[in-house]
Image (cartoon, coloured by chain):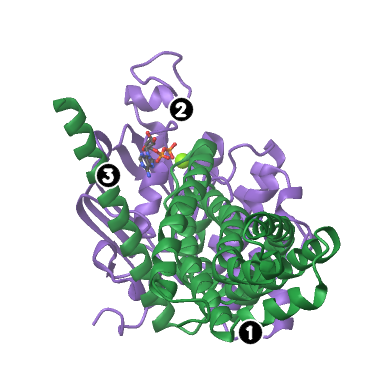
Amino acid sequence: MASKEEFRKYETGEPIVTVRNLSKSFGSLRVLKDLNCDIKAGETTVFLGPSGTGKSVFIKHIVGLLKPDEGELEVMGRNVPTLGERELYELRKHLGLAFQLGALFDSLNVYDNVSFPLSHHTRMRQKEIKSRVAEVLELVGLPGTENKLTTELSTGQQKRVGLARALALNPTIVLFDEPTTGLDPILCTTIDELILKLKTELGKTFIVISHDIEGTWNMADQVGVLYQGTLLRYGRNADVRRDDNIFLKQFFGRTEDGPMIGV
Amino acid sequence: MVRFVEFIGALFGKVLSEVGAIGLFVIKTLSVGISTFPNLKRFGEECYNIGIQSLFVVCSVGAFIGMSTALVGYATLKDLGAQNLVGIFIGIASIRELGPAVAAFMVAAKAGSGMAAHIATMRVKEQIDAMEVQAVNPFWYLIVPRFLAIMVVLPVLVVWNDFFMLGTGYMIAVFQLKINSGAVMENLLSTVAMADIWKGMIKGWVLALFIVSICTFKGFTCEPGALGVGKATNQAVVYCIAILIIINFFLSQWLYGGIGLRGM
Ligand SMILES: Nc1ncnc2c1ncn2[C@@H]1O[C@H](COP(=O)(O)OP(=O)(O)O)[C@@H](O)[C@H]1O
Ligand SMILES: [Mg+2]
C-alpha cells in the first residue's frame, strides 16, 4: 500500500512531480487546460504568468487542496488525487506551501504560527522548537519577531512568516505562491537569494510562482509560462529566456503590445 | 399559481440540500471526534471563550426575564386571589421553559455568531487551507473542540441562568409586590424538582448541538470575500433562532407533554 511505502530520497534531476493532462474547471470557467510537465528534484522551477491564469489553482492541486477534473498528478511517487485523507496528510508533511497572502492564523502570534507544524508533527521539546523557530525566522529576515501578533505585521512580513512556517518542518519540496509580489526590491532580492541558498545548501526542490521576471532569471533552473490555463512554454531557464514566441516577448517586456491581455 | 408551486418546490429542494449538507458535516465531525484523541488545549480554550462570551448576556437577559415573569405571574394570579402562589409561577416558568431557552438563545446570538464569523474568516483568508496543508485536520482543530465545549458549557449556563431568574423573580415578588418572603420561597422550593433542573440541562445540551452544528457549518462553508463572511454569520444566527424555537417546542413536548405540576 502506498501509505506504508517510505518516502525515498530523490536525486537531483529526477522527476519528483509529474503532471499529465491536468484539467480543472470551476463551473463553466476552464482554469487549467490539459497541463503536462515534469518537475525535477533539487531544482528550482518557476511558473510565470499574468494574474488570473490559474497559477494558484495549479499549486493547490500539487498539495491536494483541489482535485482535478481530469488527468494525473504524482508527487513523490503518490498519485495525489486518489489519496485518502491519512495518506494525503502523510505526504503533506514533506511539502511546505507558503500562501500568496500568508494565510497566517491571525488568532495566534508569530511564534505559535511558525511552531504550529512542529508542535503537531514532531516530538521536539519546547526548547528545540524555540530554536528552530528562531532559526527559520532569521532565514526570512525577521529575527526576534516571535511575540508579535500577525495583525501587527505588514503584508510583506506576513508573507515571510508564512514562508518561515512552510520551511519549519524542513520539507522536501517547498512551494511558494508569489513570494515576492508586493515586497520592496531589496526584500525581493533577499528572498530570491534565500531560495538560491536553500537549494544549493540543502538540495531542496522549489516550485515557485512568480511575477518577478528578473528574479526568475536569477534563481530558476526550469521555467514554465502559464497563460489562460495552458502551459505556453516549459523549458530550461536559458532557453525560455531566449525564446522568440510573441507571447513570451510581450510577457518578458521586450515588446509593448502583443496578443496577451491583462498582463 | 404555477410560479408559486415552482417557487415552493425550489425552496423545498434548497432546504433539503442544505439539511443534507449539514448532516454530512456533522457525520464528518463525529467520525473525526471518535477516531482521534480530542485536542484538550483547544477544548479548554473554547469552553473559556463560549462561557465568558455568553455569561454576561445570559445573566443580564435572564435577570430581566426573571423580573417580568414575577410581574406577569402576579398580575395573572391576583385575579384568582392566589397572588401568594407567584413563587410557583416563577419556578415553573423559569426552570422548565425560560431558563434553558434564554440561555440557548443568548449563546446562539453571542458565541454562535462568533464561531460562524471566526471560522468563516479563516476560510476566506485561506487559513483553513493552510491548516490542511500543514497536515492538521481542521475538524480536529476547529470543529470538534467547539462541539465538545458548547455541549459542556451550555447546560451549565442553563443552571446558572435558572438561579439568576429565580433570584431576580424572587426579589421582585418580595420587594416590589410585597408578598411574604417565606411564602414565595416555600412555593419556589416545593415546585422546583431536581428532575426539572436535569431536564433543563438536557434541553440545553440538545439545543447546544443544533447551535454548534449550524454555526460551524455556516462558517466552514463560507463563500469568498467579506460579503461571504457577513452572509455566513447572518444566516447562522437566523437559522439558529428559527431552529431553536422549533426544537425547544419538541423538547418541551417530550419532557413535559401532558404532565402536571410535580412531574406527574
Ligand atoms: N475555489 C474557486 N472557485 C471558483 N473559481 C476559482 C476558485 N479558485 C480560483 N478560481 C478562479 O480561477 C482563476 C484562476 O485563479 P488563480 O489560480 O488564483 O489565478 P493566479 O494565476 O492569479 O494565481 C480565477 O479566475 C479565479 O477566479
Ligand atoms: Mg495566485
Check the image and name the residue furthest to the top. A257
Image: A233 above or below B159:
above
Q: Quickly name the residue at label 1.
A: A124
Name the element at disc 3. helix
Q: Secondary structure at mark 1?
A: loop
The CA span between labels 3 and 2 is 49 Å
Choose between B79 and B62: the one closer to the eye: B79
Considering every residue shown, the one lying at the far right of the view is B175
Mark 1 against mark 3, which lies toward the viewer?
A: 3
Q: Position of residue B70 (x, y in %)?
A: 70, 60
| Callout 1: chain | A
- Residue A211 appears in view: no
Image spot of residue A156 (x, y percent): 67, 44
The type of residue carrying mark 1 is: Met
What's the CA distance linking mark 1 and mark 3? 49 Å
Report crowding for label 1: few under 14, some 14 to 19, many 20 or more residues within 10 A (C-alpha): few
Rendered hue of chain B is: green
Disc 2 C-beta below 8 A from ligand 1:
no
Give the image quarter of residue B13: top left
The residue located at (18%, 26%) in the rendering is B3
Residue A114 visible to an observer of this rendering? yes
